[in-house]
Amino acid sequence: MGKRGQHHRSENITITLEQLVPQDHLVRKVDQVMDFEFIYPLVEKLYCENNGRPSIDPV
């Protein structure tokens, strides 16, 4: 039999977080008026500095 109905889940697509959020999204408006620097000390203990994959910026 052929490969009918086979899924292509192994295909890779590269996309950035910037591309995922529309230009007119509320999150972009909030980001312009709020300083999120306070988050870094709060989540610092959740990230390993020398082991594992690089993290995505929590902000």
Image (cartoon, rainbow, N blue to C red):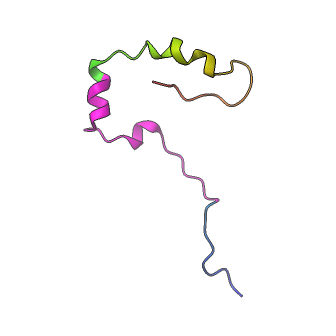
Check if residue 28 falls in the magenta segment: yes
Query: As drawn, is 37 to the left or to the right of 56?
Result: left
Residue at x-position 63% and y-position 22%: 47
Q: How many marks?
A: 0
The image quadrant where one finds the N terminus is bottom right
Whole-percent x and y of residue 22? Answer: 32, 42
Q: Residue furthest right?
A: 51
Residue at x-position 27% and y-position 35%: 26
Q: Which residues are magenta?
A: 10-31
The image quadrant where one finds the C terminus is top left
Whole-percent x and y of residue 41? Answer: 52, 11
Whole-percent x and y of residue 16? Answer: 47, 39
Query: Is residue 26 depicted above or below 36 in this figure?
Result: below
Near-viewer residue (58 or 43): 43
Whole-percent x and y of residue 51? Answer: 74, 24
Query: Is residue 22 depicted above or below 33 in this figure?
Result: below
Query: As drawn, is 48 to the left or to the right of 20?
Result: right
Residue at x-position 25% and y-position 38%: 24
Query: As drawn, is 15 to the left or to the right of 5?
Result: left
Query: Is residue 19 depicted above or below 44 in this figure?
Result: below
Residue at x-position 50% and y-position 25%: 58
Q: Residue 34's image quarter?
A: top left
Query: As drawn, is 17 to the left or to the right of 46?
Result: left
Query: Is residue 51 depicted above or below 45 in this figure?
Result: below
